[in-house]
Amino acid sequence: MSLTAALMSAHASIFDISRRVSTVSSNITRADDPNYVRRIAVNNVANTNGATGTSRAASPQLELMRRESMTGSAGAELTAEKMAQLSRLLGNAEGATSGMMEELQSRLELYAAQPADATLAQSVVGQAEQLSATIRANSQSLYGFAHVVGSEIKEEASNLQQLLADFSRVNKAVVSGQGSGMDVSDALDERSRLLNSISEIVPVSKLDRENGDMMLFTSNGVTLFDKIPRDVTAVVDSSDSSRNGVYIDGIAMRVPADGESASANGRLSSLLHLSQQTIPSALKQTDEMARSLVLTFKESDASGTLPDMAGLFTWNGGPDVSTITSHVPSMALSLSVNPAFVASQGGSPQFLRDGGANGAAYTTNAGGYSSYSERLDAFVQAFEEPFAFDATVGGADKSLMDFAHTMETGMETARVAAGDNAARASALTTSLSERFSNTVNVNLDEEISLLVDLQNSYEASSRIVSVVDEMLSQLFRATG
């Protein structure tokens, strides 16, 4: 090798090392950024035109697995959070409603044993007031919860629209940069970050195209982005959450009926499942609880000629209950104790024992016997007898007490299952994120070690330059 060639090779090596040092320094500086992917300097020292470049560390399969797990964990964690909120609102963990039902039955038993005791009669009415107030509050809480979930559906849809707009901007920068030979590593990092954020809202698949262009679509094949972002629209019905929906490019999002599958499809799917199924089911169960109480404590005309009327419990559609044979929407919202039984409102608690709150024709204790307990005994027994609950709420042929327990345990079981599912999904995402990070993110130890190697290479190349320079100087002097 001639001295000139050796000098050019050494200079090229120094240039190469300088580029690599710059890349390693950038890696070290941004090591704490979780969205930063390790850069790798790519140089061709043998090429005298100084062709250089920078590539990004990559693990496509691991990245896909992590993104899919992020979709599942985001939805599962949100579902667990909402189910915990719902359980607290309704007091399911403490068995609030069933506990009050049991207390009402217990007080009725005491009153049936001493039917002449007016204090015991008032005690039953007082407990009934507490029970009706709890059921009414639960219904109000569910409607309030539905409103919150509806607002969050709108917010998530808006966030998705904004993320798609940001994705469009960054995607254009990638395509333009790659077309002009620019280093687009930062734009690629930003696009990956946006893709991850989108995947937490909806499951997303990508299609890579020429010049770094990318197309996005949902797991159902609905286009999210193709050159331009597609419209995302949330439709929220304030009166009926089951009609809430989200439309992407004019196509309604399909939500799995199973809660675990719904949460696996991201936050929007989780919220829509809560809105379309969980909340309406809970509202229907609460309405059915109200209907069972109204009909269990109803008053009937002994002759059978007059319509059945509301007794201890009533609602704003009463007092005629003769046509109530199935679910009555929003019945629980207005459930209350009939004023005819409340002493402070001019009523008499003894109507419980004797009947007649709706007129003399409905009196069962016509003789006014203080020891009469047949009607009270029937109420006590009714708590344990099958009631014709609406089959869609899973309570067909259950007793009032069993239905109350089933309603609470069902919600609590769903809450626990959602929490367990979220823990598993989160653990998977954490594991995959760590593996992905170890593969493509910056390892400070490795970068510092590489920096030391580059420093040694730089010193070696510098010595070559010095030696060649000295040799050339001596040659020039000798040929003076």
Image (cartoon, rainbow, N blue to C red):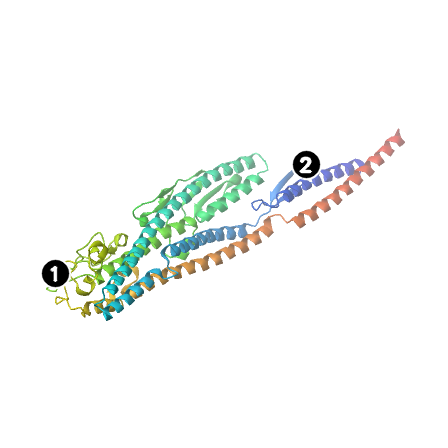
Q: Position of residue 204 (x, y in %)?
A: 45, 48
Left or right relative to 190: residue 348: left
Which-is-in-front pick, marks 2 and 1?
A: 1
The quadrant in which the N terminus is found is top right
CA–CA distance in space, label 2 to label 1 = 107 Å
**Nearest to the observer: residue 153 or residue 445:** 153
Q: Residue at x 43, y 55 (%)?
A: 80
Report the number of numbered marks.
Answer: 2
Determine whether, in the image, residue 101 is placed left or right of residue 25.
left
Query: Label 2 belongs to which residue?
Result: 50
Q: Secondary structure at mark 2?
A: loop
Q: Residue 146, position in %: x, y?
A: 35, 49
Residue most toward the top?
Answer: 480
Residue 9 screen position, x and y as percent: 75, 39
Q: Earlier in the sequence, mark 2 or mark 1?
A: 2
In the rendered image, is residue 252 in sight? no
Q: In the image, is 237 to the left or to the right of 171? A: left
Kindly identify the amino acid type of the residue bearing the numbered disc 1.
Ala
Find numbered disc 1 in the image and state the secondary structure of the residue it sits on: helix
**How busy is the neighbourhood of tag 2: few (under 14 within 10 Å), some, or many (20 plus)?**
few
Residue 360 numbered tag: 1
- In x, y percent, where is residue 53? 63, 39
